[in-house]
Each structure stands twice: as C-alpha cells, then as structure tokens.
C-alpha cells in the first residue's frame, strides 16, 4: 500500500496524537473508575442486595447499546479519519502546487474542489456527532430512571424502618457513584474505538518494510570505493509497475569506474526507473544487479539498501530545504568545511552567483528554494551531490534548466574529479552525449547500447530520434 504524503502527515500528526492522548488520559481514568465502581458495589452489596441490583439496572441496557455502539462507532470513526486524511492530502497538494494553480487560472476549480472536500468531511463529522449525541442522551435518560428507582427503594426502606435517614443518604450517594462509574466505563468505548482506529492507521506505516541500515561506518569499503571506484551493472533486468505493462525487459547496462554513461529515449520509457532500481528504491522482477570494486567482480557488494551510501543522486524535481546554502550542502556531508563547500560549488558552476549573495554560503534558502531560479536550484543540488564524494553519481535530467555551455562545463568538471567516479545520467539534450563513454537507448521496452563519444557522430540523426 502506498500513502499520499498528506495522508502520512495526518497519520503521523493526528492519529499518533490521538493514540498518545488516549494512553496518557484514558488509562489512568479507566483504572480510577474501575476502583470506584468496585468499592461502591462491594459496600452496597454488603448492606443491601436489592439496592445494588437496582443501581446496576442500567447494565443490560448499556451492554446492548454498547454492542451497537462498537459496530457503528468503528465505522464512523474510520470514515472520519479517512475524510480527515483526504482533506489534509488535498491541502498539502494544493499548497505545494500553488504557483501552477495561479498561473493556470485554476483558483475557482480548486476552490470548488475544496468546498466538496469540506462538505464531505462536515457530513461525516455531523453523522459521527449525531450518533454520539443520541447515544449519550439515551444513556442519560436510562441513568435518570435508575436513579429514581434507587431513590424510591431507599424511601421505601426508610418508611419501613429498616434504615435511618443518614443510611439512606449514604446508599443514594453510593448508588449514584456506582451508576456514574459504570456509565463512565461504558463511555470509554468510543474513545477506545477511536484510539484503536488511529493505532491501526499508525501501525499500517510502522509495519511497512524498512530500509536496512547504511554502511557509512564501514570506512574501508567507502575509502576503497572512493579511491579505486566501483563498477555497476544490470544483467537481464526486467521491471513493471503494479498492474501495468513491462517498462523494459531483459535490460543490461555496464558502467565502469570513471565512465560517464547516458540513458536516452522518449519520456516515460523507463530512464528514471532504471536510476531508481540502481538506488534500491524499486525492485526488479527479474535479473541481477551487481556493484563491485573494479577488476574484483568476485567481491560483489550486496546490492540492497545498504549500498545506497555509495551513490549520490540528483533527481528531476530538484529541491532545496529551508535553512542556508551551507546547511543544504552539509546534509550530504555534515562535517564539510567551508573550503569543501566552496569546491563543490565551483564544480557545480554555482560559486559565481553564491559568492555575490550578501551572506555567501550562509545566505538563507526559503521554502523549496523559491528565492532562487530553477537553474540556480539545479546547480546547488548538483553541488550537494558532489560534496558527498560518492563513487557513483546519478543525474536525472539534473541540468535541464541550464544552457549548453554550463551543462558541458559541469559534466567536464565531474569527469575530472580526483579518483574514479562513475556517472550515469539522463541528459535533457543530445549536445552533451559527445563526452559520454557509452549511450544506452531506453525505448519500446528495450535497453540497447547506442555507442559513445566520437562513434555517435555518424548516427547523429538516430541520437536525435531517441529524444
């Protein structure tokens, strides 16, 4: 099961808070009410069996009502949580895409959709509250009837001279305490159901498979990989998304240390999918993935989530986090010095504009980097990937907003990195393919070797058709 980001936020914030609140608030109250109920019942039962039975006269009614309550309340609680998640998801998606909504003049469309979401949530909430009110009203009337029965029996016993006036007052107080504590125990059912529903939604996240711990502490592997480089290969890999046709079949790709490999082809044919498979974000249905120190294929590193530390990745949707430029780059390498940050910015052709900012690398980055242009965001994202000094660099149309000269300059800087860095990229334009060692065409469910370097020149038309 995949979750919408807004649904995840709702589960982490609202549902987790509901579970925590129930544990902290409900359990102590429940224990107190149980002790109160037990003490009152024992005292009344000792002095007057009939009074004890009358005080519990509402028990059968409460049990029947609670049985209906549990079934209906569970359904209403689940609908409430789902409606709340949908509303949160809609808000999150709308806020993220607010610029596009304004640019395309979709304000009225999204406003109407928002009204529909609110109406759905309001209707669900009202149904839940109506049911709760009717149930509470019925239980209150039942409790009132029981109180009058207890009072009548106490007056009758007083009239017959079996008890004194003081004893009658004591019995009535204990009977009222017994009835109220029992009703309180019954009233815990809605809270327990709500907490159980929320706990189930939180557990659905917790039970999802987790990534294995990375190998960042294995300095020997990292140092060796950075110094000598690593080779990476896909052998006979096939992949398809759920309930969909195969994205590609029997794909084989090889990238040696120091090589720059390009993946070209029409949009939607699987270039980004290949990069995600390399990162372990997607699992192929068939084939073998290898990553190993060059010329040491027998020392294959296990290709799973632990190997992700060997990669640096710049996705299509480049993103900066709130903070400063330095803080953004230090996300990839927390102990990076100012000199290392400057070096990464220079390699990403970003130092010129960063140095002109009033506060340099300590300039503030607004939410999602909206105070920078797309080209600047891309260069800062590349710098963040480079400062990590991983032996494998994946660039997914990471230079699409840059001009040709800047793009080539950055790629040439990457090829000149000290050590053997393997670079796999999905270029936005064919002008940079001349500096690639090999080019693979991803199209029609197949991955085919196209050529590389000078060998691309005679078949330039074929290269262009790959886009």
Image (tube, rainbow, N blue to C red):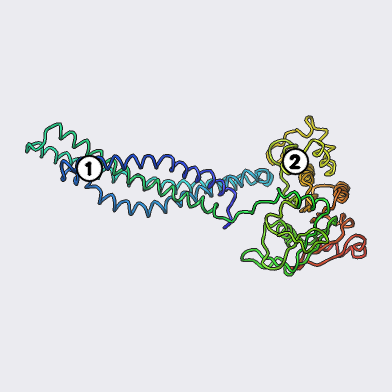
Residue 466: where, in percent of width, then height?
Answer: 82, 63
Q: In this view, does 336 lie to the left or right of 209?
A: right
SS type, badge 2: helix
Q: Report if residue 112 is visible in the image.
A: no
Q: In this view, does 73 lie to the left or right of 17?
A: left
Residue 54 falls in which quadrant of the image?
top left
Q: Name the residue under label 2.
A: 329
Q: Give the number of the disc on residue 42.
A: 1
SS type, badge 1: helix
Residue 262: where, in percent of width, then height?
Answer: 82, 58
**Alpha carbons under labels 2 and 1: distance apart:** 69 Å
Q: Which residue is drawn at 38% across and 40% down?
A: 28
Q: Give the number of the disc on residue 457.
A: none
- The image shows residue 185, relative to residue 443, as above or below, that is above
Q: Which residue is drawn at 76% across and 51% down?
A: 220
User: Which of 426 and 428 lies nearest the eye of the viewer?
Assistant: 426
Closer to the chain start, of discs 2 and 1, is 1
């Amino acid at each position: 099961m995949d979750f919408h980001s807004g649904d995840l936020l709702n589960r982490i914030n609202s549902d987790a808070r509901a579970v925590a609140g129930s544990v902290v608030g409900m359990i102590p109250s429940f224990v107190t009410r149980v002790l109160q109920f037990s003490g009152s019942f024992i005292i009344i039962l000792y002095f007057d069996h009939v009074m004890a039975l009358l005080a519990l006269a509402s028990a059968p009614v409460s049990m029947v009502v609670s049985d209906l309550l549990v079934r209906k309340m569970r359904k209403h609680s689940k609908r409430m949580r789902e409606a709340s998640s949908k509303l949160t998801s809609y808000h999150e998606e709308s806020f993220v895409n607010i610029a596009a909504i304004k640019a395309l003049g979709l304000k009225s469309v999204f406003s109407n959709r928002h009204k529909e979401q609110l109406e759905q949530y309001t209707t669900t909430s009202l149904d839940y509250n109506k049911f709760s009110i009717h149930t509470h009203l019925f239980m209150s009337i039942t409790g009132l009837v029981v109180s009058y029965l207890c009072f009548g029996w106490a007056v009758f016993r007083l009239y017959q001279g079996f008890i004194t006036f003081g004893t009658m007052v004591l019995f009535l107080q204990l009977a009222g305490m017994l009835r109220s504590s029992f009703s309180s125990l019954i009233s815990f059912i809605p809270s327990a159901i709500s907490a159980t529903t929320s706990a189930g939604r939180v557990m659905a996240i917790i039970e999802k498979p987790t990534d294995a711990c990375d190998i960042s502490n294995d300095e020997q592997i990292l140092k060796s990989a950075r110094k000598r480089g690593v080779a990476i290969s896909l052998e006979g890999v096939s992949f398809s998304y759920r309930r969909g046709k195969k994205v590609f079949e029997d794909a084989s790709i090889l990238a040696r240390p120091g090589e720059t490999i390009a993946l070209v082809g029409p949009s939607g044919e699987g270039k980004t999918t290949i990069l995600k498979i390399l990162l372990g974000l997607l699992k192929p249905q068939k084939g073998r993935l290898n990553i190993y120190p060059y010329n040491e294929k027998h020392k294959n590193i296990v290709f799973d989530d632990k190997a992700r530390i060997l990669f640096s990745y710049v996705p299509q949707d480049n993103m900066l986090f709130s903070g400063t430029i330095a803080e953004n780059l230090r996300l990839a390498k927390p102990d990076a010095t100012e000199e290392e940050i400057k070096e990464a910015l220079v390699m990403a052709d970003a130092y010129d504009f960063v140095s002109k900012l009033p506060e340099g690398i300590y300039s503030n980055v607004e939410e999602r980097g909206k105070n920078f242009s797309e080209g600047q965001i891309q260069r800062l994202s590349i710098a963040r990937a480079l400062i990590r000094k991983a032996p494998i660099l994946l660039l997914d149309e990471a230079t699409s907003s840059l001009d040709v000269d800047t793009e080539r300059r950055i790629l040439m800087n990457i090829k000149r990195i000290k050590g053997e860095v393997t670079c796999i990229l999905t270029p936005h334009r064919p002008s940079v393919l001349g500096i690639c060692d090999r080019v693979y065409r991803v199209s029609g469910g197949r991955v085919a070797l196209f050529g590389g370097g000078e060998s691309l020149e005679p078949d330039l038309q074929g290269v262009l058709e790959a886009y």
